Amino acid sequence: MLAGLSWVGARARWVLALGVLLATLLPALSAFLRPALPGLVVLVFCLAMSRLDLGMLARRACRPRRLALLGFWTVALMVLTPAALWAVLTAVGMPAPHVAALTYTFAAPPITSSSALCLMLALDAGFALELTVFASLLTPFIGPVVIKVLLGDAVPIDALDLALRVAAMIAGGTILALLVRKLAGAAAIERHAGTFDGIATVVLVLFVIPLFDGFWSLARADPAFALATFGLVLAANWGAQTLTATGIGRAAEPALAGAAGLMWGNRNVATYLAALPPDPLFTLYVGFYQIPMLFTPLVMGWLLRGRGRTVSNG
């Protein structure tokens, strides 16, 4: 079994890409797993955090200059970006459900696997790791406030309730990660890294499946809206990656710019889906969002190879 999990972990990018395609074909399983989505968010966060030396990261991040730098990146990531985007989209008259979905997206932290994806693509994984952890831990204090300020009464619950729900998932994942790390030991986790990769990949596939609950019925009900949503998702993900990496690349080294682009385009928006009351249109958006997100290693790997960059075969 351990060998099987290691095999899965070594082929994570292909397993994830196949998993998101299979998720669209399993409506009964999607509906069955939908109530477990908050727990799966906790588990995904736990598995990502259990691989990290949180004490070392905290000591490094608490240096004044480093803390200021991470604070700057987090504000740009989760405050300035959604505010600017909301202003532009509202001005051009984009439909309210799409404005809301994009606001939730860019008020979310990077996906927990950002550093792993950066390792696959030979980008600055250290920077991705620090910013992802820092932004994730601050999400309950920043994200709900930004969302409520921008969307107002369109948010179905108040900011404090949303913050508490998000905090419960992130705190639960962090506490579980600390327990796993204490019980298993850092050396054992490192020694069985391939097995942990396999477990994380399987859990990520399970996590994706409930995100497609009701996907096809929603898509069939309004194909034009569904197609527009899919186009919006591609722009939000791959478009944000490309624009951010290109813009930052003028002032920073390519590895850091690429890591920033990957984090800007790949956000943990499913955390808000799990925290909010069911919303069919937001569910459709988050389901679509998994496609470019889980295909990022393949697509970005191809683009980087086209530029002559060395990419890990991870």
Image (cartoon, helix red, strand yellow):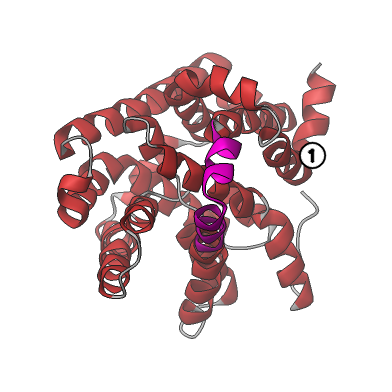
Residue 133 shown left or right of residue 18 in the figure? left
> Dot 1: what SS?
helix
Question: x and y percent of residue 64 in the render?
Answer: 24, 58
The residue at 44%/20% (across/down) is 176
| Image vertical order of residue 211 relative to residue 97, above or below | above
Q: Quadrant of the N terminus?
A: top right
| Observer-nearest of 314 and 302 | 302
Q: How many marks?
A: 1
Amino acid type of the residue that numbered disc 1 sits on in the rendered structure: Ala
The residue at 63%/21% (across/down) is 29
| Observer-nearest of 24 and 221 | 221
Question: x and y percent of residue 255 in the render?
Answer: 59, 69
Q: Residue furthest front?
A: 221
Rate crowding at label 1 as few (under 14), some (14 to 19) or many (20 or more) other CA atoms within 10 Å.
some
| Numbered range of the magenta stretch | 214-232
Residue 223 shown in magenta: yes
| Image vertical order of residue 106 relative to residue 189, above or below | below
Residue 118 visible in the snapshot: yes
| Observer-nearest of 96 and 70 | 96
Residue 101 shown left or right of residue 29 in the figure? left
The residue at 45%/45% (across/down) is 268
Q: Residue furthest bottom?
A: 250
Question: x and y percent of residue 185 in the render?
Answer: 56, 21
Question: x and y percent of residue 43 in the render?
Answer: 50, 25
Residue 268 shown left or right of residue 239 in the figure? left
Q: Which corner quadrant of the image does residue 99 belong to?
A: bottom left
| Image vertical order of residue 48 relative to residue 299, above or below | above
Residue 241 shown in magenta: no
Residue 51 visible in the snapshot: no
Determine which residue is flagged by label 1: 10
The residue at 56%/17% (across/down) is 32
